[in-house]
Amino acid sequence: MNVSKERRVARKKRQTRVRKKVGGSVERPRLCVFRSTKHIYAQIIEDVTGKTLVAASTVAKDTGDSVKYTGNVEAAKAVGKQIAEKALAKDIKQVVFDRNGFLYHGRVKALADAAREAGLTF
């Protein structure tokens, strides 16, 4: 097995382990984060119905203009701030954080901290 496949398999194991404990309800939906090498994505999901309530990413047009490069900590902070603003506009104040198998470090941590600073509680 090559290194990239081993990393992918290890992330999937962490993802299933985290998902067993973390679930979004109507009162506290799940803030799910996905990161690739070039972009970072965040969405707030209500798991009872399986619907995405709010989404933000570096691919979106409204975020893409504000950041120079989309695969760094500054871009993650911008997405975290934007997801919190959109959530508060839809009257979502509390969420459950789902790191989606990624380590809570770097861009994932920056997104979470920015969302907390903008008003989300988790």
Image (spheres, rainbow, N blue to C red):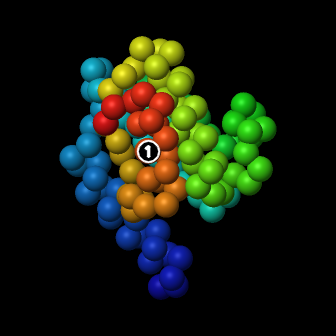
Identified at 56% across, 45% down, the residue is: 77
User: Which image quadrant: the C terminus?
Assistant: top left
Residue 90 vs residue 78, the one in the foreground: 78
Left or right, 36 with reference to 34: right
Hey, which quadrant is residue 38 in on the image?
Answer: bottom right
Left or right, 87 with reference to 59: left
Image height of 66 relative to 17, above or below:
above
Q: How far across and how far down the image is residue 118, in percent? A: 48, 31
Q: How far across and how far down the image is residue 103, in percent? A: 39, 62
Residue 7 vs residue 107, the one in the foreground: 107
Q: Is residue 54 visible?
A: no
Hey, which quadrant is residue 14 in on the image?
Answer: bottom left
10 Å crowding of disc 1: few (<14), some (14-19), many (20+): some
Image height of 56 relative to 9, above or below:
above
Q: What element carries label 1?
A: helix
Identified at 63% across, 62% down, the residue is: 37
- Residue that label 1 marks: 113
Q: How far across and how far down the image is residue 91, in percent? A: 42, 14
Left or right, 12 with reference to 67: left
Hey, which quadrant is residue 31 in on the image?
Answer: top left
Q: Can residue 61 be seen in this view?
A: yes
Residue 110 vs residue 1, the one in the foreground: 110
Residue 13 vs residue 38, the one in the foreground: 38
- Type of the residue with mark 1: Asp
Q: Could you tell me how many numbered marks the image carries?
A: 1
Identified at 46% across, 19% down, the residue is: 88
Q: Which residue lies furthest to the front in this view?
A: 117
